[in-house]
Image: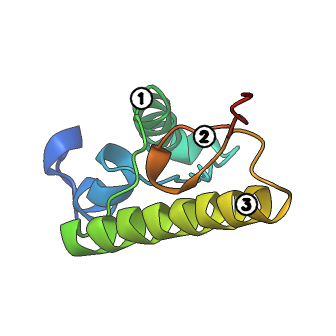
Amino acid sequence: GQTTHIPYRDSKLTKLLMDSLGGSSLALMIACCSPSPAHVEETLSTLYYATRARNIVNTPSVQQDPREQLIQSLRSEVELLRKENGYLRQQMQLGGRGVTPLGSRSVTPTLASG
């Protein structure tokens, strides 16, 4: 039986690899070629396909559920606030040195002479 040419975009292989070739993932393609003169057309077709697939450029991005993204952001903020709280507690234990809670200014008492 004679096989007909299937265009690159309509091929079953392209449909199977659609997420890898055009998505945000990494793909490895192995092109199997035959040294036999009887398979020259198949080998050339495979090499052309592999070349076109190699030239596809993707920009990978992390795809994260919006809820998960919010949770991660809030966890980061909590961690930052805990560190800041620990630092401020340490400063208060060391005598303040100009740092007081709630961002108020440290007032140094002065003795009135008289």
Q: Position of residue 38 (x, y in %)?
A: 54, 46
Amino acid type at circle 2 is Ser
Front one among 73 and 23: 73
Front one among 19 and 48: 19
Q: Which residue is mark 2?
A: 106
- 69 left or right of 38? left
**Residue 84 figure quarter:** bottom right
Please say if the residues under marks 1 and 3 sit with CB atoms less than 8 Å apart: no
- 64 left or right of 79? left
Going from N to C along the chain, the mark reached first, 2 or 3, is: 3
Q: Is residue 8 above or below residue 79?
A: above
The disc placed on residue 8 is none
Q: Position of residue 64 (x, y in %)?
A: 31, 64
Amino acid type at circle 1 is Val
The disc placed on residue 57 is 1
Residue at figure coordinates x 66%, y 46% from the top left = 36
**Distance between the alpha carbons at the discs numbered 2 and 3:** 11 Å
Q: Which residue is mark 3?
A: 92
Image quarter of the C terminus: top right
Residue 7 in view of the camera:
no
Residue at figure coordinates x 68%, y 32% from the top left = 112
**Distance between the alpha carbons at the discs numbered 1 and 3:** 55 Å
Going from N to C along the chain, the mark reached first, 1 or 3, is: 1
Q: Is residue 3 above or below residue 64?
A: above
Residue 109 in view of the camera:
yes
Q: Position of residue 52 (x, y in %)?
A: 40, 29
Q: Position of residue 26 (x, y in %)?
A: 52, 52
